[in-house]
Amino acid sequence: MAVQKRDLKSATISSLFWKLFEQGGSALIQLVVQIVMARLLAPAEFGALAIMLVFVNVGNVIVQSGLNTAIIQAPDVTERDYDTVFWMSLAISAVLYAAVYLAAPAVADFYSMPALIWPLRVLVLILVVNAYNAIQEAIVARMLDFNKTFRATVSAALVSGVAGISVAVLGGGLWALVVQQLSFQVVKCVALAIQVPWKPQPVFEGDRAVVLFRFGWKLLVSGVLDQAYQSLSDLIIGRVFTSSDLGYVNQGKRYPQALGIVLDGAIQPVMLSAVSRVQEDLVQVKRLVRRALKTSTFLIVPAMLAFALVARPLVLLLLGEKWLPAVPFLQMYCLIYALLPINTTNLQSLNGMGRSDIFLKLEVIKKAIGVSLICFTAFVLRNLYAIVAAQVIAGFVYNFINAFPNRKVIGYSYGEQMRDVLPAFGLAAAAFAAGWPVGMLALPNIVLVLLQLLVFAAVYVGLAWLLHVEEFTYLLRNVGQLLGKRRG
């Protein structure tokens, strides 16, 4: 048993770093691509993309139907199960594609964007590609073999970035964003197909489909609720305000979201796979969940507050003055994504323990609260800033809702969780306070950004070292061990 725990820890840490490299490498490339395209394209075109992505993102949740998580979590999955799930997903994707294809003129008319019809029809082809890609990623996650997704994701980011920028330079406008999004998914799918030995066979087992769907349907409903809720503000802003306003809000969300995905998105899939392997050992499960929460919080909270600190000079430096209206939204989304580790760690632990029933109940409660806030701020207050600010408030409420069930499920109470994350929030607040006065200096934007980040990092790391913060020591020790193994 002790050997198994050591093997699991070694595999988990190795997978974590591969996942971090994957998320970080891809995000860095896509960040450069987005900066270039933001300079070449107008805010209204990014607003149009945000509306189209609503259909893609909700469709992706339906295509996967929670079955990719079922593949990761179930203890007795076979290749015949992979085939069964694939054919189900492919059939669903074909139906959804046909529905969106036919509905595209109505969507374009509703938003008074006649040029939206064919870009939407082409972009939604992503659903068909992802029916295959979802199985590939589930297999990789199940085996904790994330070096394969690292290679695929980075390759896809490079190829799609070149394709999107090329179309933008040639004057393609909105089509540049469509080409970049679609080519990313296609290249990633092909790159994984080269590495993952599974290939779909003409096999469909109805009894296994029922077993897997019994687990997955709750995640399907939860996923649709979550994605529909996240997309609701985009749909409302695009309708009540202008596509340019939506472009500013979407761009303000994009960068904190990308940073959160790099860090939290590296930790959570690894944790889900690890928890599902030891779900009978509650002591081990709680240890894994605590480690994931403390580590992700220690990394994400300072990253988000540092980003909020340098938001204005950074936007001027990278995107240009036309994107300055996005700064307040960027700063508010930094606060939202600073809370990401608490929310996702608790939800992923429930998934890993097979408690999709609780997961669904939580989503229903949260989305009822969220929809009420969005509708009130959009249709009563009719204030763009209030819409995003309401999401910040909702984020704090969701923290408690997501954490509450784990007191019984794995014995990890909300009070314990708050004590575990307090060091990261305290150190980040101190670092933010130290870096804030630097922003008042009359310096070039690049110097201002670098100086504020330097002060922030020095205070955060320095205090963590002086106070012997456990998360800091843990990260240093494991990075050193991993590098030692690579050299050996």
Image: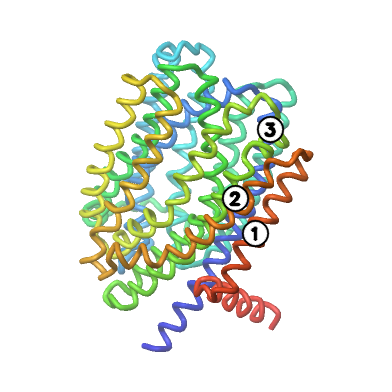
Instruction: Tell me the distance, in whole angstroms, between the alpha carbons under discs 2 and 3.
Output: 18 Å
> Where does label 3 land, which residue?
319
User: Can you say whether 236 is above or below 418 in the image?
Assistant: above
**Badge nearest the viewer, 2 or 3:** 2
Q: Nearer the viewer, residue 125 or 319?
A: 319
Q: Residue furthest bottom?
A: 2
Q: Amino acid at mark 2?
A: Ala
> Where does label 2 land, which residue?
306
| Marks 2 and 3, the one that precedes in the sequence | 2
Answer yes or no: do the residues labelled 2 and 1 have beta carbons within 8 Å?
A: yes
| Marks 2 and 1, the one that precedes in the sequence | 2
Left or right: 272 in relation to 451: left
Secondary element under disc 2, as helix, strand or loop, is helix
Secondary element under disc 1, as helix, strand or loop, is helix
> Looking at the picture, how far across and down is residue 354, in whole percent?
26, 62
Circle 1: is it few (<14), some (14-19), or many (20+) Cα within 10 Å?
Answer: some
Circle 2: is it few (<14), some (14-19), or many (20+) Cα within 10 Å?
Answer: many
Q: Amino acid at mark 3?
A: Leu
> Looking at the picture, how far across and down is residue 352, in whole percent?
32, 63
User: Can you say whether 447 is above or below 5 in the image?
Assistant: above
